[in-house]
């Protein structure tokens, strides 16, 4: 009897296991589709598509729903009880505009979870959200899927004047998404020049060694020589470097080296126009050879760390932060993070931004970060795309450059990104309940006017009294170095080169690009470390062209012609 | 032969044992769902796979993806790098734990033995992302721990471990062995514990010393498991450890350190070319299967050993 019971119980256990497992599988599926199990767009399903949605006092009545998907990073913090589909922002959208925001699914940021989830849900034929924001480089495949509508036409029809004006500042932002004359996605335009570089120098080292900030590559060499050989940190050891740099694979990283090349007249790793006005790949232009020779000399002389080809940006920045290096090229925000830490680590350290140095022929140059990194796609199934525009227009009209006394004068919501104490507005870090950024909850890509941020910084640095609420906020939340850097990048903006190829991968690009890139970086590193002569650069250019580079250049020129209509 | 005996011999006594078979069902179902159903995905190797079209709707491209594998200028170099790195890793990954287990087995003090065993096992749990950063610091030419030690003790000029192709391979193999040999040791120690003590007693009676005992009892007893591990490892010869290489390699050592997986990462994963990625995966599996079959056969012929 006992034995029999044991048999039966184990059998029952295994049955339960099977059941649990199967339930587990189907459970995942449910979770994948939608919080309440329905999913998909039900926007205005009761309304015929060609009829305008009824509005009362500027809000939709009855309320409408817009669906979206998004990542939820650690930077998205919530107040007690709030969550991504019920918070100060979603309540605002509901009350102000009559729009319900619904997330079909959310993913963490790590491990490309968003891309994986999107791919899986597409291959499982699950409904796509009404609007979908992705990285610009990932949009090409999605446009190819044919599941999204002509966003440019919608933009022309529904975008507000403020939004259109902002977009008109960077007309080339549309180029990557042009298909047969249609603009298939709306670029999520960002502040321009924000990522343009200036030269940050340890001012206290310059002062100690009685040097002036360099304005040319020659002067920069002398300064670096002093930084390396005259013991600027005063510890009687030769343990300092002239400049930090990363030559691992991206020469235009946020710790930049492209500026050195730019001083000789060509910026590597982007597609730029040569002297004749034809599009060429920067890395194969003859000017690169001179710059490589110079960098090799600097590595040999110890101006650069011997392991620049191993270091990523953070490893390189560590040298600066720990007080071991004197010069860094980087964007306007580089002082705020991470360079500022050097002040904590080294008593008396002062960092100051300076203009980019000029080369022997007076040339200056650097690569631009582009106008945007995210892009918005609009689902073909979305019957009333004007809902999205109503929302984004409102933010462009009222939030981006808020009017004094208006709804968003101090920020988005009291008790979140600002508070009023004794009748005066207070900001991070003085908010009694702690700072929470409601902009992190915004639907889609945050609205930004390209010319806004950096120009304002530069104007404030130039002595302008902050007048508008926006200027006041910027003045309070920026460092002196950031403002000075802004002035510099505005004055040197004409030297910033855009990467002219932003389109979908061409056939040769798909097949050969990785190989060409590897070829390039291997050849350059060999030259920098003396494993190949400087003249081997000419062989590299020949090999690069033969291995598909020439054909790729043709294809990219063709593409540029079609989108620019030249 | 009576009925009961017959049934026992055939091994299919359903009436008496069906509950036992039923207990296997969860495992079988799990394997079907998680190991066999996904295998259908290899179809993608012959497609220009687009997620929104699915496996059913994507375009068939025949052997195109495979042509692409061998059409790349550096694919041969990459395969060759992979095989060399893996071969060294497999060899060192067998010999080091084997010898270490033998040595540890001679330790009489149990507490010491246990401590050492745990300590060498620990690195197995560290991720290469963390170790990558640590190694780059430790092996730095400029004040790195290892180079300082070599310089102070032996007067050797700093070695560019991660910047010179040959030293890079050496570093990869040594750091792999350091990270994993503790794990391998456990398997060998378990085998050692399973050797019948009466064999040693008989050997002592015959006058064999410690060394002779090791040579004629311990080592032969460990051969089967060594062969199993070696055989199975051969199946993975085209896996040279993506995590490790990806976190340590750089443009200076591409020529000797770029492996199949990092190559696929750059050409297939980053560019979202899933058909190509699957084709490489399939190619690796086929090679791996051939090697396993061959080495299994060799193990049978030479060592008279069969796993199944």
Image (tube, rainbow, N blue to C red):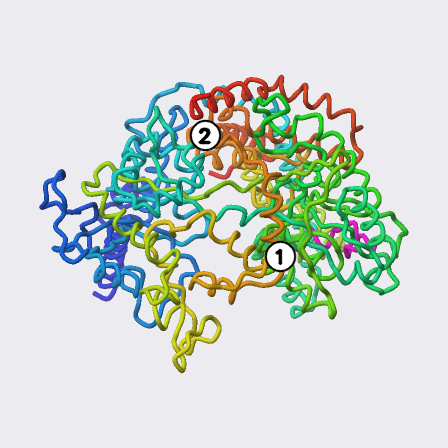
Residue farthest toward the right in the current orientation of the protein: B155
Q: Residue at x 67, y 52 (%)?
A: B178
Q: Residue at x 65, y 32 (%)?
A: B81
Q: Is residue B143 magenta?
A: yes
- The CA span between labels 2 and 1 is 34 Å
Q: Chain of mark 2?
A: A
Q: Is residue A459 magenta?
A: no
Check the image and report above or below for A193 versus B46. Answer: below
In the image, A296: left or right of A406? right
Residue A489 drawn at (x, y percent) = 60, 48
Residue B261 drawn at (x, y percent) = 55, 36
In the image, B60: left or right of A64? right
Which picture quadrant has residue A146? top left
Circle 1: element type: helix
**Mark 1 highlights which residue?**
A484
Quick check: do tags 2 and 1 share a chain? yes
Q: Which residues are magenta?
A: B134-149
Frontmost residue, B54 versus A334:
A334
In the image, A34: left or right of A262? left
Frontmost residue, B189 versus B119:
B119
Residue A168 drawn at (x, y percent) = 40, 39
> Could one spot residue B280 in this view of the protein?
yes
Q: Residue at x 44, y 25 (%)?
A: A564
Q: Residue at x 17, y 47 (%)?
A: A43
Circle 2: element type: loop
Q: Chain of mark 1?
A: A
Closer to the N terminus: mark 2 or mark 1? 1
**Mark 2 highlights which residue?**
A503
């Amino acid at each position: 009897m006992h034995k029999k019971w044991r048999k039966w119980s184990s059998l029952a256990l295994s049955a339960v296991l099977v059941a649990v497992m199967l339930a587990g599988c189907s459970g995942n599926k449910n979770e994948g589709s939608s919080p309440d199990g329905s999913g998909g767009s039900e926007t205005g399903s009761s309304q015929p598509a060609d009829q305008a949605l009824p509005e009362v006092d500027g809000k939709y009545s009855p309320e409408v729903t817009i669906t979206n998907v998004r990542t939820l990073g650690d930077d998205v913090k919530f107040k007690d009880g709030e969550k991504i589909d019920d918070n100060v922002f979603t309540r605002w959208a509901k009350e102000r505009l009559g729009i319900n925001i619904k997330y079909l699914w959310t993913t963490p940021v790590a491990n490309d979870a968003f891309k994986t989830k999107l791919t899986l849900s597409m291959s499982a034929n699950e409904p796509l959200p009404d609007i979908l924001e992705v990285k610009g480089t990932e949009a090409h495949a999605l446009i190819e899927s044919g599941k999204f509508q002509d966003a440019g036409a919608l933009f022309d029809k529904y975008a507000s004047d403020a939004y259109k004006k902002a977009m008109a500042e960077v007309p080339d932002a549309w180029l990557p998404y042009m298909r047969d004359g249609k603009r298939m996605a709306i670029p999520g335009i960002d502040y321009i020049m924000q990522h343009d570089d200036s030269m940050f120098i340890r001012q206290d080292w310059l002062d100690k060694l009685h040097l002036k900030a360099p304005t040319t590559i020659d002067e920069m060499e002398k300064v670096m020589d002093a930084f390396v050989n005259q013991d600027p940190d005063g510890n009687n050891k030769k343990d300092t470097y002239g400049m930090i740099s990363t030559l691992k694979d991206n020469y235009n990283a946020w710790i930049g080296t492209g500026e050195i090349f730019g001083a000789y007249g060509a910026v590597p790793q982007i597609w730029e126009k040569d002297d004749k006005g034809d599009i060429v790949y920067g890395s194969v232009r003859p000017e690169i050879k001179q710059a490589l020779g110079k960098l090799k000399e600097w590595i040999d002389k110890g101006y650069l760390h011997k392991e620049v080809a191993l270091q990523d940006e953070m490893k390189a920045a560590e040298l600066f932060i720990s007080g071991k290096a004197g010069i860094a090229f980087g964007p306007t925000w580089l002082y705020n993070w991470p360079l500022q830490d050097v002040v904590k680590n080294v008593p008396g350290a002062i960092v100051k931004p300076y203009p980019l140095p000029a080369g022997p022929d007076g040339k200056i140059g650097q690569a631009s970060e582009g106008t945007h990194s995210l892009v918005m796609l609009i689902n073909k199934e979305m019957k009333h795309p004007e809902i999205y525009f109503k929302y984004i227009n409102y933010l462009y009209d009222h939030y981006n450059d808020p009017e004094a006394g208006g709804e968003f004068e101090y920020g988005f919501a009291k008790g979140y990104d600002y508070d009023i104490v004794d009748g005066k507005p207070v900001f991070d870090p003085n908010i009694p309940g702690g700072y929470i950024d409601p902009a992190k909850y915004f639907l889609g890509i945050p609205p930004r006017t390209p010319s806004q941020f950096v120009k304002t910084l530069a104007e404030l640095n130039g002595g302008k009294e902050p007048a508008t609420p926006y200027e006041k906020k910027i003045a309070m939340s920026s460092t002196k170095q950031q403002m000075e850097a802004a002035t510099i990048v505005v004055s040197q903006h004409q030297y910033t080169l855009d990467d002219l190829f932003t389109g979908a991968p061409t056939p040769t690009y798909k097949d050969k690009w990785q190989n060409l890139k590897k070829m390039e970086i291997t050849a350059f590193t060999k030259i920098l470390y003396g494993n190949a002569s400087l003249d081997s650069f000419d062989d590299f250019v020949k090999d690069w062209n033969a291995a598909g580079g020439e054909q790729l250049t043709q294809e990219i020129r063709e593409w540029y012609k079609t989108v620019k209509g030249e | 032969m009576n009925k009961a005996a017959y049934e026992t011999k055939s091994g299919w006594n359903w009436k008496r044992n069906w509950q036992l078979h039923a207990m296997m069902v969860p495992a079988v179902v799990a394997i079907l769902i998680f190991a066999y159903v996904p295998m259908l995905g290899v179809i993608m190797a012959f497609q220009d796979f687009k997620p929104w079209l699915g496996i059913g709707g994507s375009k068939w491209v025949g052997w195109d993806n495979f042509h692409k594998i061998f059409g790349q200028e550096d694919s041969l170099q990459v395969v060759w790098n992979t095989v060399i790195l893996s071969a060294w890793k497999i060899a060192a990954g067998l010999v080091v734990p084997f010898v270490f287990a033998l040595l540890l087995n001679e330790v009489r003090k149990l507490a010491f033995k246990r401590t050492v065993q745990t300590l060498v096992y620990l690195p197995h749990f560290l991720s290469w992302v963390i170790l990558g950063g640590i190694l780059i610091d430790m092996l730095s030419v400029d004040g790195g721990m290892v180079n300082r030690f070599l310089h102070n003790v032996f007067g050797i000029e700093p070695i560019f471990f991660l910047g010179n192709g040959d030293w890079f391979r050496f570093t990869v193999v040594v750091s792999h062995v350091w990270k994993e040999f503790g794990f391998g040791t456990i398997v060998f120690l378990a085998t050692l514990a399973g050797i019948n003590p009466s064999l040693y007693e008989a050997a002592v009676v015959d006058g064999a010393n410690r060394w002779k005992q090791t040579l004629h009892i311990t080592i032969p007893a460990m051969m089967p498991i060594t062969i199993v591990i070696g055989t199975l490892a051969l199946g993975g010869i085209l896996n040279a450890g993506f995590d490790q290489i990806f976190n340590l390699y750089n443009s200076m050592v591409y020529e000797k350190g770029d492996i199949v997986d990092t190559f696929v990462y750059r050409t297939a994963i980053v560019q979202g070319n899933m058909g190509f990625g699957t084709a490489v995966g399939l190619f690796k599996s086929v090679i791996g299967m051939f090697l396993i079959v061959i080495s299994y056969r060799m193990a049978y012929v030479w060592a008279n050993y069969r796993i199944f």
